[in-house]
Every structure is written in C-alpha cells, then in structure tokens.
C-alpha cells in the first residue's frame, strides 16, 4: 500500500519558539512511518518546515516539509498553515491508498478530509497540545474572531 502520513508538528513546543532538534528519529510519527515501511508499504511523511531537524539525515522513506504561512495568526507551534499542501494533496491524492493525519483541529486534517475523505484516517494525540490554545493571550483571539 501507499501511505501518506500528515503530521505537521513532530514534538510539542512549550512556547511559541520552536526549539530545533538535531533529529526527528525519536519522534512517534517517524517511528510509525518506519514501522509501515518495514511491513512493506510505501510511505511518505509530511511535516511543517519549522520541524525540519538541524542535522541532515537519511531516511528509509520520503519526508516532505511544507513552510508555514501567516505565522502571526496561525502559530506554527499550534496551528501551522501549510503553503502548497492543499495543491499537493489535490494533485497527488490518487497515489495514496490511505492518508493518516494527526490532530483533529489542523489544516492538514481539514485539507485531507476535503480532498480525500474516503481515504483519510484522523487520529488524535494527547490533549497537551490542544490545551495550549486556551493559554493564548486574548489579543490572539481578537485576530480570529
């Protein structure tokens, strides 16, 4: 099978500043993708550019990074808005048998649900990430309300 995994945020950043890591090989989604690969599936993993590791690594499957846009409103550590992902999914959705996306409330999941609803599996991680939305300063909410 051809599996696309959409996971914009590899690790939860405690602040708006995303601490860059040397590697992503210890993240949950990297290891999930690796497990699918070891079972014989073709895997592509997509993440937000802000989570690209500092050290260039070699992977057993394809990883694509999409840059976040409008970062003052759609904070990359909370709700990254990917430039070009909608078009990528629209043009490539037929290549994949399944699209696994994390986080119910993300543009990645929204785009996949719109463009490939019958192939999309959304799974929700722990609620630590979602609780961060309630800690945003009130000025943030004035921008989106």
Image (spheres, helix red, strand yellow):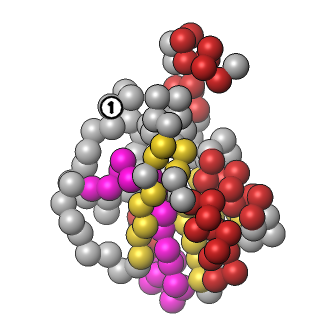
In front of the other: 53 or 85 = 85
Which residue is denoted by mark 1 in the rendering?
Answer: 17
Q: Residue at x 61, y 53 (%)?
A: 108
Q: Above or below — where is 89 with respect to 124?
A: below
Q: Residue at x 27, y 39 (%)?
A: 19
| Residue 145, image x, y percentages | 70, 19
Q: Dot 1, crowdedness within 10 Å: few (<14), some or many (≥20)?
A: few
Residue 4 among magenta residues: no
Q: Above or below — where is 131 with respect to 101?
A: above
Can residue 7 be seen here? yes
State the residue lying farthest toward the top. 138
Q: Residue at x 56, y 60 (%)?
A: 85
In front of the other: 133 or 107 = 107
| Residue 67, image x, y percentages | 43, 52
State the residue lying farthest toward the bottom. 40
Left-right relation of 143 to 135: right
- Highlighted magenta segment, given as a residue range: 35-53
Left-right relation of 54 to 102: left
| Residue 98, image x, y percentages | 67, 74
Residue 45 among magenta residues: yes
Left-right relation of 123 to 54: right
Q: Residue at x 48, y 68 (%)?
A: 45
Which quarter of the figure is the N terminus placed in? bottom right
- Give the number of callouts: 1
| Residue 50, image x, y percentages | 36, 47
Q: Above or below — where is 56 with respect to 49?
A: below
Can residue 134 be seen here? no
Quarter of the image for residue 20 reads top left
Indicate the secondary structure of the residue bearing disc 1: loop
């Amino acid at each position: 099978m051809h599996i696309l995994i959409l996971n914009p945020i590899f690790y939860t950043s405690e602040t708006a500043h995303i601490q860059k890591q040397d590697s992503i090989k210890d993240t949950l989604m990297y290891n999930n993708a690796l497990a699918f690969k070891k079972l014989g599936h073709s895997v592509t993993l997509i993440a937000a550019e802000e989570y690209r590791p500092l050290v260039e690594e070699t992977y057993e499957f394809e990883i694509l990074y999409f840059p976040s846009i409008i970062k003052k409103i759609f904070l990359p550590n909370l709700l990254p808005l990917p430039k070009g992902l909608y078009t990528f999914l629209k043009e490539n959705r037929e290549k994949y048998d399944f699209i696994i996306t994390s986080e119910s409330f993300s543009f990645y999941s929204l785009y996949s649900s719109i463009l490939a609803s019958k192939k999309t599996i959304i799974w929700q991680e722990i609620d630590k990430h979602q609780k961060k939305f309630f800690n945003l300063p009130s000025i943030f909410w004035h921008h989106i309300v």
